[in-house]
Amino acid sequence: MGAQHRRPNLDREDYTVPMGSALGQAFGRYENLTLLGRGGMGEVYRAHDPELGREVAIKVMLDATPEFLARFRREAQVIARLTHPNVVQVYDFGVNGSGKSYFVMELVQGTSLDKVMRERGRLPPTEAVRLARQAAEGLGVAHRAGIVHRDVKPSNLIVDANGHVKIVDFGIARIQDAGQQLTNVAMLMGTPGYMAPEQAMGRTVDQRADIYALGLTLFEMLSGCPPFVADDPISLVVKNAQEPLPSETLRSLGIAEPLVCLIEQMGAKEPDSRPQSCEAVISALDALLVAAEAPTVTPPIPDGARSVSATPFVDLGGSVAVPPSLGRARSSGFLLAMIGVAACVLAAVVVQVARKPSPAPGWC
Ligand SMILES: Nc1ncnc2c1ncn2[C@@H]1O[C@H](COP(=O)(O)OP(=O)(O)O)[C@@H](O)[C@H]1O
Ligand SMILES: [Mg+2]
């Protein structure tokens, strides 16, 4: 498979704080820490719980500002409210002797989806749809509990050896109708390459922002590359909010038209044009899976989807032609939105600096 299909490596090896900086410290009764991963808010370690005789994951807060501490504590509380096989479980919360906050989670024996894609390139459509469906199940439970994740992306989905998905990282989740609002205008949160336009504009977001990000994640699973890539986070926020989803890339790869249409809807710039709930996304994905298993049957058209003829999934394994450029013509309908985006770009950069301090090889 050509390098063009490989997503940029966004690992945090370029971070200024040394990886594994919490190693050697005690975290409650948990022992034998080994580094599992690192994101914008903290480091995640594998550890042993001698009391209960099981392996666990411990997320340690790296940044100690009061805002981030509050957010970190709340992340643990948010996850603790959710019980679902597709959402990571939280077991415990604590502060160690050095004042570092941490919470203890179930250890997911798997690989984050971004790493899976870096290793394997794009995924076969049926597999991608099944993974997205599980993510939609977990997100649906969060949404029904009034929680919007707001940072759905491949590195926040862990896939185990059986293809089971767990959603992690509710660090910037929004609790709808909560009195306390941790995010203000100056602290726009999210990841530029997956952020729904309304989130980039600093508007209040609902579950449809997660549906947008899941649509972009599904796009990436199918193509091996994020739909929007830019040299810097500012251009990426603008591109994501303004440019249409480059769905011709998916068509050129032979992805079935109903699946492309669903991704176009999920990635619609206007929240009203997207599937309105994860349940709607799940029914649409189920219809596609049924159609994939019986390709001669025309699948039911998902909620509001454009009518298209049934096309079986195409196995995309092996090498294929390089997709056309991701660039597409500007949509004049979003010029006004651009003004809002521009106003928020500075704030977005502030957040990105917090979540990704050093330049990465490509922003997505
Ligand atoms: N419960 C877990 N079990 C195993 N690995 C995990 C777990 N939680 C997170 N990870 C790994 O750690 C990485 C960073 O975790 P995440 O919660 O996304 O942190 P951040 O908020 O810093 O982005 C994930 O991409 C994943 O690889
Ligand atoms: Mg993360």
Image (cartoon, grey):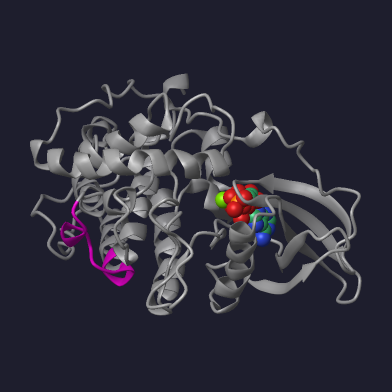
Q: Is residue 144 above or below residue 65?
A: below
In the image: residue 253, left or right of residue 128? left
The answer to which of 9 and 241 lies nearer the viewer is 241
The answer to which of 326 and 64 lies nearer the viewer is 64
Q: Residue at x 90, y 76 (%)?
A: 51
List x then y, in percent, for residue 54.
83, 69
The answer to which of 218 and 37 lies nearer the viewer is 37
Q: Residue at x 13, y 58 (%)?
A: 305
Q: Quadrant of residue 38?
A: top right
Asked if residue 177 lies in the magenta stretch, the reply is: no
Q: Is residue 106 above or below residue 234?
A: below
Q: How many marks?
A: 0
- Where is the C terminus found, in terms of image quarters? top left
The answer to which of 188 and 319 lies nearer the viewer is 188
List x then y, in percent, for residue 303.
16, 65
Q: What segment is highlighted magenta in the picture?
A: 270-282
Q: Quadrant of residue 266?
A: bottom left
List x then y, in percent, for residue 279.
31, 71
List x then y, in percent, for residue 325.
27, 22
Q: Quadrant of residue 320?
A: top left
Predominant SS along the magenta part:
helix
Q: Is residue 221 visible?
A: no
In the image: residue 92, left or right of residue 350? right
In the image: residue 50, left or right of residue 161? right
Q: Residue at x 37, y 78 (%)?
A: 177
Q: Residue at x 78, y 55 (%)?
A: 46
In the image: residue 186, left or right of residue 306? right
Q: Is residue 294 visible?
A: yes
Q: Is residue 155 above or below residue 80?
A: above
